[in-house]
Image (spheres, rainbow, N blue to C red):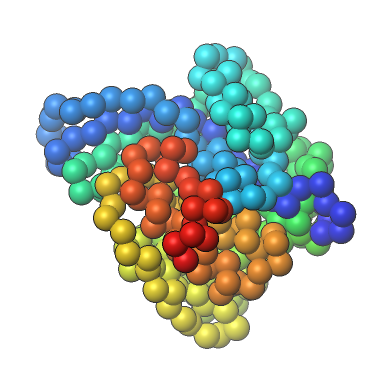
């Protein structure tokens, strides 16, 4: 990986899932059984979603991950190819393709249970074979050892390292020291530490997404708020991935963090106006048209 003459703007290393989505009037309480109003099977996984988001935002994008030898794996490969994402690093494993069971209520709120499946087989050795890129983006739906190995390889090559720490997990100090930009949501931020603690560990910038309230940027000891883009939300699934993909695509173009954030906030908001994850990810033209 290198920043000079890189064939890709962004390499995304992460998960690919088949999303099993139910719509309900309200999210169930513990022990409660309710009827679903609808059911759909859709492409998903934070890695796949963010790769598609980057590609729709105009970034030359490659995806590295694992799917199973099943119909879901074939379907997800086709989705990425149709979006123009390079999948030469998408491997096939004997485990079933990952799944995410998603429940969405009438207010657009959701609950998600993820089954790793083939995603758990993404080996740290992939770090030795990544294509050159200006920026490398990762999440935590693949093994932590793989995330750490990729971050180290990207850092050695001079690529910008972005980590979306989802689902929330305790992050090793050695990994934090290699991260340039960390993008937790509010609940993830509460688990991984304050911006001051993260900066002390080596993270250059911490961007906390706040849903309908926009986002916060902590950089060089300064905390600033990025105002939200107002929309009428129908489904928050995929909004964080739209935000992260737009952020990374803009950073790979050389935009400043604040410039990239202004675009990312709009992309994340627009994603809440369309149901589904991949279906909701906006194009750059759509985002710039309302900025």
Q: Residue at x 18, y 35 (%)?
A: 24
In the rendered image of this protein, does residue 97 appear above or below residue 51?
A: above
Snapshot quadrant of residue 266: bottom left
224 left or right, relative to 11: left
The mark tally for this picture is 0
Q: Where does the image place residue 78, in percent across and percent down from the top left?
A: 59, 24
Q: Residue at x 71, y 35 (%)?
A: 86
Q: Where does the image place residue 218, in percent across and percent down from the top left?
A: 52, 77
Judged from this view, the residue extending furthest toward the top is: 70
Q: Where does the image place residue 193, in percent across and percent down from the top left?
A: 46, 69
Q: Where does the image place residue 224, in percent across and percent down from the top left?
A: 46, 81
Whether residue 11 appears in this view of the structure is: no
Judged from this view, the residue extending furthest toward the right is: 5
Q: Residue at x 63, y 56 (%)?
A: 249
215 left or right, relative to 9: left
Q: In front: 280, or 63?
A: 280
Q: In front: 199, or 228?
A: 228
Q: Residue at x 32, y 31 (%)?
A: 21
Q: In front: 177, or 70?
A: 70
60 left or right, relative to 157: left
Snapshot quadrant of residue 87: top right
In the rendered image of this protein, does residue 248 appear above or below residue 77?
A: below
In the rendered image of this protein, does residue 126 appear above or below residue 264?
A: above
Whether residue 194 appears in this view of the structure is: yes
């Amino acid at each position: 990986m290198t920043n000079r003459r890189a064939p890709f703007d962004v390499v995304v290393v992460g998960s690919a899932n088949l999303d099993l989505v139910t719509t309900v009037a309200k999210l169930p309480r513990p022990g409660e059984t309710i009827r679903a109003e609808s059911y759909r099977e859709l492409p998903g996984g934070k890695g796949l979603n963010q790769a598609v988001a980057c590609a729709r935002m105009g970034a030359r994008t490659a995806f590295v991950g694992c799917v199973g030898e099943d119909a879901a794996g074939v379907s997800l490969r086709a989705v990425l190819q149709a979006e123009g994402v390079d999948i030469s690093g998408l491997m096939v494993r004997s485990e079933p393709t990952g799944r995410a069971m998603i429940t969405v209520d009438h207010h657009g709120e959701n609950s998600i249970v993820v089954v790793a499946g083939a995603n758990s087989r993404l080996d740290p050795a992939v770090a030795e074979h990544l294509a050159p890129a200006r920026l490398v983006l990762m999440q935590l739906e693949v093994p932590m050892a793989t995330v750490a190995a990729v971050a180290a390889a990207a850092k050695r090559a001079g690529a910008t390292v972005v980590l979306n720490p989802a689902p929330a997990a305790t992050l090793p100090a050695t990994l934090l020291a290699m991260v340039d930009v960390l993008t937790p949501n509010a609940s993830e931020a509460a688990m991984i530490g304050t911006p001051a603690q993260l900066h002390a560990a080596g993270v250059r910038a911490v961007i906390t997404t706040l849903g309908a309230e926009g986002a916060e940027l902590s950089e060089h000891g300064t905390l600033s708020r990025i105002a939200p883009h107002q929309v009428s939300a129908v489904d928050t699934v995929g909004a964080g991935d739209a935000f992260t993909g737009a952020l990374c695509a803009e950073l790979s173009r050389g935009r400043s963090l604040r410039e990239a954030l202004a675009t990312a906030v709009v992309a994340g908001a627009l994603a809440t106006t369309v149901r589904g994850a991949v279906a909701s990810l906006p194009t750059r033209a759509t985002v710039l048209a309302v900025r």
